[in-house]
Amino acid sequence: IVSLSSSKPEKERDWIDEQVLFLNGKDVSERDLVDFVSKATDPKLKKGQLCEAYYFIAERRAQANDKVAATAFYKEVLGTKATQLSAYRGAQYALQAFGK
């Protein structure tokens, strides 16, 4: 799937392509991931994608032992209030912030 996503011209990539490339360290930075979300015109879709973007950024920061930045991004996830997403619940778990 990585090779398929990376073979697409940038303008043809969808949200899944961006996530796959980011998570595999291929041509998509944290800023690129968040900027991609700004293209969404549906507010509910944008909120969900932003939740996921912040979560995956937090996870990458946590893996790099950057706990301060990871915590900040997990808090951004909770700020989206996209409670229906597993990324939201993952951030709750990471912060031990259930009920928020």
Image: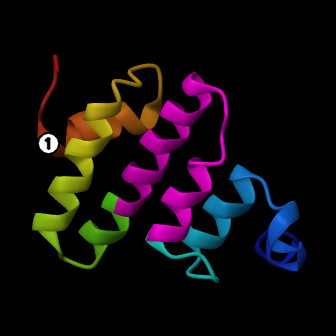
The residue labelled by disc 1 is 95
Q: Position of residue 23 (x, y in %)?
A: 55, 69
- Residue 42: in magenta span: yes
Residue found at x 88% / y 74%: 9
Residue found at x 54% / y 62%: 33
Tell me which corner region of the image, top left, top right, bottom left or bottom right, holds residue 58. Answer: bottom left
The quadrant of the rendering that contains the N terminus is: bottom right
Q: Label 1: few (<14), some or many (≥20) within 10 Å? A: some
Above/below status of 93 relative to 84: below
**Residue toward you, 42 or 33:** 42
Above/below status of 11 relative to 16: below
Q: Which residues are magenta?
A: 31-57
Q: Position of residue 48 (x, y in %)?
A: 52, 33
Callout 1 secondary element? helix
Residue found at x 32% / y 40%: 77
Tell me which corner region of the image, top left, top right, bottom left or bottom right, holds residue 89. Answer: top left
Residue 48 relative to residue 77: left or right: right
Q: Position of residue 4 (x, y in %)?
A: 88, 71
